[in-house]
Amino acid sequence: MLVVFAVGWSWSIARARAAGDTGAVTPATANIASALTEGAAPSVAYLTGAALAALASPARGESGKLRARIQQPGTPIAPILADTLPPGAVAEFSSGAAAESTSKLVAPPRPGTWSLALKIGNAIKPLADFSVITLRPATEKRAGRLGLYYIGNWPAARKGRPGVSYDPPTGFIEVTPQNQNTQLSDHFKLKDFLPHDQQNVWPKYIVVDIKLIDKDELVLQDLKEHGINPNGVRVLSGFRTPQYNAGGGDPRGRAALSRHMYGDANDIFIDNDGDGQMDDLNHDGRVNIADAKVILDAVNRVERAHPSLIGGCGIYSATSAHGPFTHIDTRGYPARWIGTGDS
């Protein structure tokens, strides 16, 4: 199998070179091709595969569905695993034409969306379907902007309930046309959490708490276990900049300190028939707030089983602008409500 794969890989590289597309052969491609034809590669690849499996388990979250870590540049990815890499292993990160290598599992020092691989000698093993997202520091914001993208300004930090943060974000995910389809989990992508304004301004900057995505995935899994297909999940509203939260779309019902501004809230609905509206989840022949409650019931079950993900959940009826939906957040204490307009 190894020989067949190596021959196929080499043939693909040769065809790319014959076509004159020299840019198609990246350093990572060259490393993989070299590893596959190197005699010691199988045993070395096994070691790196074992290390990656150990890394992937906690990184996938309580749902097991996460496909990304979001963190500050230069911070440890998995501190308890940093000293368990095979001797001589290095972590290799790539983001477009950019590349970084470290001897420990530490996030790259530059902001970006990075793929990760472990390398020993000529053998390299990628962590499939997983990204490390490093943040652009909030200190780079000037007059409420990062580059051309207008974010606005957060209210001053204030004390809330224990464990609940109202501190302004310390960093932002940079979203570009090239990385907007990056999977945060099995069902959610970066672009699902973009505010609905400044459509032609790139790059955009958002805040997403990966705990929220973990909770969302558990809710979808619970719905599936109760006979509801979750694949049609849609995010009506994800992250909101302060300026958008105050005036974008329909601001009725929005809290001045909405959890959407802190990246740990989203409004979702299930739309498997593709009509842009919530489906009839309770099969009563109507689409209304009772269908949003079906998702609320799933949230309640998930929070009982996963207390670390406790937060708010509100159900909303349809308006002229949208159908019914369910708000989910991970604020740190339970809250339930029935609302109208936007959450």
Image: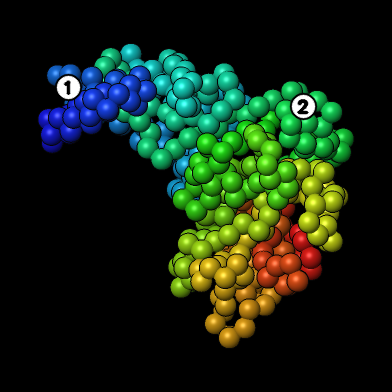
The residue labelled by disc 2 is 141
Residue 187 vs residue 102, the one in the foreground: 187
Say which amino acid is labelled 2.
Lys
Q: Name the residue: 47% across, 42% down.
A: 67
Residue 292 horizontal/vertical position (percent): 65, 70
Residue 123 horizontal/vertical position (percent): 27, 21
Q: Secondary structure at mark 1?
A: loop
Q: Give how far apart the Cα atoms at labels 1 and 2 are.
A: 48 Å
Q: Secondary structure at mark 2?
A: loop
Q: Are marks 1 and 2 in contact (CB under 8 Å)?
A: no
Number of the label disc, if any, that sits on residue 37: 1
* Image quarter hosting the N terminus: top left
Number of the label disc, if any, that sits on residue 332: none
Image quadrant assignment for residue 91: top left
Most distant residue in the bottom direction: 285
Q: What's the coloring here?
A: rainbow
Q: Is residue 233 above or below residue 209?
A: below
Say which amino acid is labelled 1.
Thr
Residue 5 vs residue 263, the one in the foreground: 5
Is any part of residue 86 visible from this angle?
Answer: no
